[in-house]
Amino acid sequence: MMASLDRCPAANAGRLGASAQAPRATSTDAQAPRVTPAGTHTPRVNSTDTQAPRATLSSALAAEVRKSRHAAPMRLALIMALPFPLIALLTAPSGNVSFSPWNYWYVLLMPVAIALFTGCVANADARMRNRPLLGSGAPLGQTWWAKALWCLMLSGLSNLVVLALYIAALAIGGSLSAAAVLTMALAALATTITSAWMIPAGLFLTARAGLLAGIFLPLAVQLVGGFAWSAIPVPQLFPPSATTVIPTAFIPVLPSGEPLAADTVLGGALAANGTLTWAGIAVAALTFVLLTAVSAAWFAQSEEVR
């Protein structure tokens, strides 16, 4: 009995000795550095390889579209464009499509729509102290241009809705033609460009002085300047009167709602001198670009947005 007990520790010791001679591989052994053969080049990992792609104007514009395509700016651009063209659509079955509702659209309701959705786009980031913009990593100047271009697209969408309803009205009335579509398309394009100055003005005033200033100040200037078109010697060349006068060259309705032939001075000038009309459109486009560039430079350097 004693001998068997003595043999057990010896056997256990033998087994322990065997196990000690063959140690198990641990995870740390697998982590040992591999030997690189001589002459093999190991590429160096730069920090720039793991950085996110650099933001561009198109990516900033896409971000602006995603932020507000299902929000108030898109709904305003669509809904505000409906009332006056629907009047023309309702009178279309009689065969007498009136262009006066289109005149009331770009003189009265369109400036309201532009002021509202521009204020909404600017206020979306301003109410959060521009944290989404600062956290995106995109240059602030690019984000400002993206906002301006998105608002310009919304304005173009509103005028496209008006154009589509008038095309439908002329088709119902039986007077639709290729010439009519081209003329109305040019009117919609001219209206979008000549009113574009309101966009950078509204963005700047909203960022600098608040939402109410960004909405009402450009709107007041546009409405007053629009109704003062007859007091300016060359109204076609200067916004905001150009917004009221230039579409008259394409749609035969004066800013007062009267037929184009009722004013022999303005109507005759618009009919006889197309160069003046296109010069006014060019000046309006240049005004939008300059105002956006100046306000973008301010936004990029302003301490108020940080």
Image: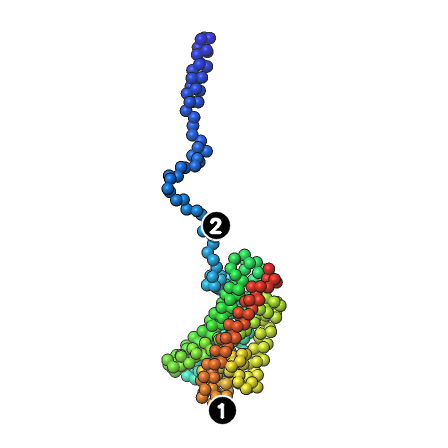
Q: Where's residue 4, x and y in %?
A: 44, 10
**Residue 264's mark?**
1
Q: Is residue 137 above or below residue 180?
A: above
C-alpha separation, residue under disc 1 versus residue under disc 2: 70 Å
Observer-nearest of 211 and 201: 201
Give neighbour class at mark 2: few <14, some 14-19, many 20+ (Cα, 10 Å): few
Taking the view exactly as shown, the residue that stands out farthest to the front is 39
Q: Are marks 1 and 2 in contact (CB under 8 Å)?
A: no
Q: Which residue is mark 2?
A: 47
* Mark with earlier residue (1, 2): 2
Residue 91 in percent (x, y) is at: 45, 81
Q: How many marks?
A: 2
Q: Nearer the viewer, residue 61 or 105?
A: 61
Above or below residue 185? Residue 140 is above
| Residue at 41 percent of width and 20 percent of height | 18
Q: Give the amino acid type for the residue marked by disc 2 in the picture.
A: Ser
Local SS, label 1: helix
Q: Secondary structure at mark 2?
A: helix
Q: Vertical placement of 300 versus 217: above or below? A: above
Name the residue at 56% across, 64% down: 300
Task: Describe residue 189's horizontal placement relative to residue 118 as left or right.
Answer: left
175 vs 131, left or right, is left
Identified at 54% across, 60% down, the residue is 133
List x then y, in percent, for residue 230: 55, 86
Name the quadrant of the N terminus: top left
For residue 252, which numbered disc appears in the image?
none
Residue 25 as seen in the image, left or right of residue 290:
left
Q: Is residue 114 visible?
A: no
Question: Picture coordinates of residue 267 (x, y %)?
Answer: 48, 88
Q: Is residue 18 visible?
A: yes
Amino acid type, label 1: Thr
Mark 1 neighbour class, 10 Å CA radius: few under 14, some 14 to 19, many 20 or more: few
